[in-house]
Amino acid sequence: MNYLADSSRYDNMEYRRCGRSGLKLPAISLGLWHNFGGVDVFENYRDMLRTAFDKGVTHFDLANNYGPPPGSAEENFGVIFKKDFLPYRDELVISSKAGYLMWPGPYGEWGSRKYVMASCDQSLKRMGLDYVDIFYSHRFDPNTPLEETMGALDSIVRQGKALYVGISSYTAEQTLEAVKILKELGTPCLIHQPKYSMLDRWVEAPTPAGSLLDVLGDKGIGCIPFSPLAQGLLSNKYLNGIPEGSRAALPHGFLQESAITPEVIEKLKALDTLAQQRGQSLAQMALAWLLKDQRVTSVLIGASRTSQLLDSLESLNNTNFSTEELNKIEEILA
Ligand code: NDP
């Protein structure tokens, strides 16, 4: 059946300005790392994408290597884009990245101009797009001059293949350097994509350059935390073991069973109790907790089914925390 987007799709979503740029992103964005690959079920991920857009989620995040197999998430997205989203292209922010291993040989990963520019071309082809809205350097390359990697991002924008550029998982110091180079080139850094959740708070940690969050706030760069639910740990699903079909149970899932320790479970149980007192699910509270900081432009969630997406979207109904609640969370996470 032909897809017609819900006419009320913009009624309930909150849109936040990405740093000091002109671009706004939905407070919740959807990533296609897991559950949209060649091993997954077409009707399931199509329904998630349609439902997301119907609810005002205008931002879909991809990368060259998402699958498995690598590249298949972009291919599958391309199929659905053509069938369902073509009329809505100008309402969508689609991102991709290059940095991790994508093809064999010396030019298939990291940050050389040779790899980054070829990878962008490949991603556009797989998705059937003329351009992406944001193109990222997926990881810092210690063996390539940063000027070369940032120069490749700048060229991609000048060639009309991306509108904005971003970086992912760069430290505070690397970020400052990248931001400076990009500014000199005339293509400002729009956004940083770091791993950030209640269970992984490295972005808050002080460094000689300041914390990454402080650097982003000072420089007017957006922040879009990935794995905000710590790959599903920050939900009630692992409180009593590892359920069948969950990411920790999947052979190709990135979440390792070894991450689910008794200490983590104890914290999750205490957080779950607090979430219930707030009238939220643990997943909803974990997302709301990130969104309380206005430097966080959007949280980049994953989902394996539409019901999870709908559950996570409900987090926007309560992003306020009392001082007591915040203190309690610090106590639990300590
Ligand atoms: P999350 O931390 O949101 O984990 C998503 C998983 O959590 C789902 O697959 C599902 O697990 C479970 N889940 C989601 N919602 C709920 C819910 N409401 N209740 C219960 N369980 C839930 O994010 P991801 O780790 O998937 O990462 C999100 C996106 O971030 C990626 O798709 C990608 O776009 C980006 N990313 C970027 C990286 C980078 O290097 N820049 C690295 C990693 C991710 P289950 O499958 O068990 O049902």
Image (tube, rainbow, N blue to C red):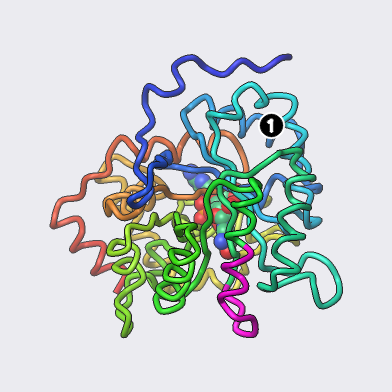
72 versus 109 height, above or below: above
Is residue 145 part of the magenta span, yes or no?
A: yes
Residue 291 seen in this snapshot: yes
At a point 67% along the width and 62% down the height, the residue shown is 98
At a point 62% along the width and 44% down the height, the residue shown is 132
Q: Residue furthest right?
A: 104
At a point 74% along the width and 41% down the height, the residue shown is 127
115 versus 28 height, above or below: below
Determine if the C-beta at disc 1 is less than 8 A from ligand 1: no
Q: Is residue 13 left or right of 165 when viewed as pictured?
A: left
Q: Quadrant of the C terminus?
A: bottom left
At a point 58% along the width and 60% down the height, the residue shown is 154
Residue 239 seen in this snapshot: no
Q: Quadrant of residue 83?
A: top right
Residue 136, how many percent across, how many down?
Answer: 58, 59
Q: Nearer the viewer, residue 253 or 8?
A: 8
Q: Is residue 321 left or right of 245 when viewed as pictured?
A: left
Residue 207, how many percent across, how many down?
Answer: 33, 82
Q: How many marks?
A: 1
Residue 166, how many percent across, how many down?
Answer: 51, 58
How many residues crowd around disc 1 within 10 Å: few (fewer than 14), some, or many (20 or more)? some
Is residue 304 part of the magenta span, yes or no?
A: no
Find numbered disc 1 in the image and state the secondary structure of the residue it sits on: helix
Q: Quadrant of the N terminus?
A: top right
Q: Nearer the viewer, residue 174 or 168?
A: 174
Q: Residue furthest left?
A: 323
Residue range highlighted in magenta: 140-152
243 versus 202 height, above or below: above
Q: Which residue is mark 1?
A: 46
Residue 69, how many percent across, how many down?
Answer: 81, 56
Q: Amino acid at mark 1?
A: Arg
